[in-house]
Each structure stands twice: as C-alpha cells, then as structure tokens.
Image (tube, helix red, strand yellow):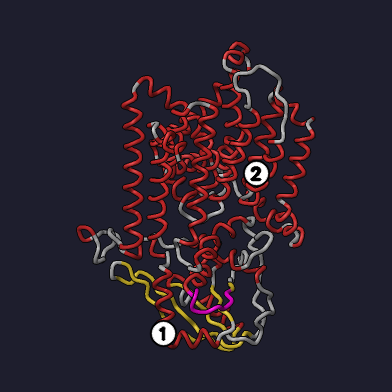
Amino acid sequence: MQIAQKWLTEKTNQLVLCLLVGGLLFRAFVAFWLYPTFDEAYYYLYSLHLDWSYFDHPVLVALTTGFGPWLTGVVSQFTIRMGALIAHTGSLLLLYLISKRLFSPQAATITLAIATISPIFQVGFGILSLPDSPLMFFWSASLFCATTELFRQPNSSNAYVPSYRLAILGVLVGLACLSKYHGFILGLGLVGFCLTNPRYRCVFRSPWAWLSLGLFVITIFPILFWNIQHDWVSFRFQSERAVPRSGYNLLNVILVCLAGVAYLFPTIGLPLWWVSLRSTLTRTVQVFSQKSLKSDKFLHDSSLLILWVSLPVILGFTLIGGYRQILPAWSMPGFWGITLLLGQQAIIWEKQSRLWVRRWLLGSGIMVATILLIALLQVTTGIMQKPSQYALMGGFLPPKDDPSTELIDIQQLRRGFAASPVLSTALEKSSFIFTNRYYIGGPIAMSLEPLINIPITCFDIGKDLRGFAFWSAATQWLGKDALYITTNPFNQRKDLMDSYRNHFSSLTEIATIPIRRGGVVVNVIYVYQARTLLKPYPRSYGI
C-alpha cells in the first residue's frame, strides 16, 4: 500500500493512471451501448464451436470473445467485449513500459496519450471484440520482451549475450500468431533486425534462439494441426488475398493512406506518417555515418527495432491496397509501434512549445471523444435520422441511406422472439436455423441465448460459408425442418428464394420482427418456415 501511495505522489504516474483508467471507462461505456457488429457476432459463434483454429483466423479471438459470456453467463454486446477491454488496457500499459525503457517517462506518457486518443486504436483494438485485441496485447508483450532482452544494458559497450528471454519471446510471438496471422510479420521483423545488426547476429548461434524457435512452433501447433486436417485452407484463404487479381492502381494506394490517416484521426495520423518516413530516412543515413552511430547507438538501434516490426505492416498493406480493397485495421499494428517514435518526437516539440503539445493532445482527445459519442448516439438513437423522436433539429439522414441501420439490436430481436407464440413454437419444432450470409448468423445466435439452444448454419448461393462449412456436415439435416431468418435487404430476393425452394419442400413466411431506432422501424427481420430439406445444400470455403 505504501509503495502504491509513493508511486501516486508523482504527477507523471497520476497522469498515467488517469489515462489507463479513464480510457478503460470510456471504452466500457461505448462497449455497453454499441450494438454488436457483424464480425463480433460471428466471432461469438467461434466460442460456441471451440476448435484448434478456424477458417478465417486462429483461435484466440474465440477465447477473448467467449470470456465475458463464460464468466457472467450473460450474452450481450458488453460481455462479448470484456476480453477486448481488458486486453487493450494491458496493451496500453505495455506500450508505456516499452517507451519508458527505450526513451523516458515523459515520452512514455505522451506515447500512452497518443495511443489512448486514436479512434482506430480505441475502437478496433479496445472496444470491438476482434482478432486485433489479443494480437496487439501479445504484439506489445513481444516488443517489450525484445527490448528487455536486446537493450538490457543501454549505456554499456559490452558485447550482447543472449539470455533466457529469447525463449519467452518465442512463446509471445507464437501467441501473437494465434491471435492473427500478422504475428508472423512481427516475428520476421524481429529476425530482420537481428540479421542486419552486427551486434545481435550472435542471436542465431545461441541455444536460447533454437529453444525459442522450438517453443514458437509448439505455441502455433493449434494453427498447424487444424490446417493439416483441412488441407491448409486457412493459409490458402489468407495468402490468396495478397495475390493480385487485377491491375495496379496508384490512386488506390493514395486513398488507402488517406483512409488510414482518417481512422487514426488527422492530427495523429499525419504526424505518424511523417515520423515514420523521417525516422526511416534518418536511420538509413546514419548507417553510413559512423560518428552518428557511435554518439547515439542506443537510440539508433531502438528506432531501428521499432521500424523493423512496424514498417513491413504499414508499407505491405498500403501497397496491397493498390490492387485490392483492404480493411482499415490491417495496417494499424504498424502504426501502433510508430507511436513510440512519435512520443519521443513530441518531447523535442515540447522543448520548443510545451503549450502547443498540450493543446495538440487535449484538443485531439476532446474532438475524438466528441465524434465517437455522436456516432454512438446516431447508431443507438438516431440523433441525425429523419424521422426520429430523438433527432436534433428534425434530423437530415433517411434510414435507407444510413448503413448503421444494418446493425441489429440483439435485445430487440430477443424480445421479438420471446414475445411471439408463433416463433416460440416454430423454434421448438425446428431442427436448425439457416440464413443467407455467414455474418447474419452471429446476431441471431446472440439473440436466441438463453431462449433456446438450436444449431445455426448458412446456406449461401455464393457458397461463402466461412466457418459454417466446418461446423456442420452437408447431409446433417436431410429430411429436417428449419427456420430461414434474414434481414430486410435480402428479403424476397428472387435468386435466394428460388434456391431455397429447390432444396425444401415448402418455404413460408411466418413472422416479422421490426427493429426500431428513435421510434421508427429501420430494419425488419423476416422468419420463414422451411419444411423438409430435400437435398444437401452446396457448400464451399469462399476461396
């Protein structure tokens, strides 16, 4: 207790605690009210079908998504995000400790503030239950372990001697790979740093490195084992995303860069790009300047390590954006590392104008929090929707033009199922539920808990079943009755209905569940009774 009180007497430590706790409370507030996204609900299905790995991603997202429901016994948008909330707080703390070790407590505090403010870090890593949450925790843990191992004696000129920490590093990088395949890029970045730095090449002659490699392989065994069983389908699915299928468009690369800046928030995204390019150029020049290396070898090596694990992700996915659409989160682990360099750069800026740096961080934080809260109110109450009983100044955005109306309030859907005698009877008499898109199955599964335990699958005429292709057999429900559940955009689509009528003896609409926002119906869930599955529905892996 006395140690904690002494630690809290320092103003810097008080600010660190405020950032960590305040950030957690803000993210928890958003996580409580924001409807589950389709990806999150889909990963909830992972937790219902525990396996060594999955078609889309490795196993850890199933554990972080299932953590809250298993702990509380309640399935809600908040409980499926509890693992992400905790993991991101750990990631922020580790990022702070890395910066403090490599640079200074002041730089570490600014780094923590930048990472806490950035909206893509808050939402993509710290609110939504996505594979990125465990990835960034173990990415940060790996980088912390690497800095602890490689820079044990920052002011010493003694030769580097590998230690047992290399073995721990192998496990941590393996756990990053079990979170998302980005972990392999992290491992290659660490290897590249040691290969290109004469001081650290002795790593590859150390028995600790070989033990690290062995522990790494053991750690990623679940991925290997599952893929061996399924003809390496997950690796093939992910690797084919990197193969160009059309011409290259430099304009798309620029658009990817601008989108990344927007998701990071411009006052943070632009400085991150600037410090990335500047640090890369500076360290490249220093390689040819022995005087610079000798005068500040520790800072040079620290920056190089950060660049080696960050730039391959940033540049790799940015360049891929020239020939295929990429998701915003794909390049963000790289920018997470670059915040360390931006935090150190901000210390230099503070010497010129401390007030400017404070205004930069405080202004960015206020703007980001305001925008996120406005977006949350729009998604949940429709403050910009026209019409809506909560609309400000009458609103201006019709529901049909608002893509956020596709998000499903699982509480409303659950109440709709529970309140309808027709649906309650149909659920009890049906052997399974199917829908037409893999991502719609998740919200349905969440809404039916704890009402009934019934299998859910996907019959997609495009044959993109993702995980559903492995969670059931094609002949499993032959001769059985089912419920077909879909959303308003897909209802009565002729190609879908014709396909289902060819596979079932009859298909009849039995109920609808309106989803309201601001007192207005913005989406409708349609439920059909499908009698007797006559033949197996075609399935594929979506590759």
Residue at (53, 50) in percent of width and height:
133
Q: Residue 239: image x %, image y %?
A: 67, 50
- Residue under the image location 56 percent in, 57 percent down: 64
Q: Which of the pair 457/436 is nearer the observer?
A: 457
| Badge 2 element | helix
Residue 389 belongs to the span the image colors magenta: no
| Furthest residue in direction left, as rendered | 393
Mark 1 / mark 2, whichever is N-terminal: 2
In the image, residue 80 above or below residue 512: above
Q: Give the prevailing secondary structure in the magenta stretch.
A: loop
Vertical placement of residue 169 versus 327, above or below = above
Left or right of residue 70: residue 477: right
Q: Helix, strand, or loop for circle 1?
A: loop
What's the residue at 39%, 33% (across, down)?
9
**Residue at mark 1 to residue at mark 2: CA–CA distance:** 49 Å
* 49, above or below 532, in the image: above
Location of residue 297 by image quarter: top right
* Residue assigned mark 1: 420
Q: Is residue 352 above or below residue 332?
A: above
**Viewer-nearest residue: 439 or 43:** 43
Q: Nearer the viewer, mark 1 or mark 2?
A: 2
**Residue pictured at 58% horizontal, 72% vertical:** 458
Q: Examine the rendering and report whether any part of residue 185 can be seen.
A: yes
Question: Circle 2 is placed at which residue position?
Answer: 172
**What segment carries the magenta color?**
448-456
Q: Residue furthest top?
A: 291
Q: Quadrant of the N terminus?
A: top left
Q: In the rendered view, does 43 fall on the left or right side of 519?
A: right
Task: Pick the quarter of the image with the C terminus.
Answer: bottom right
User: Which residue type carries mark 2?
Assistant: Leu
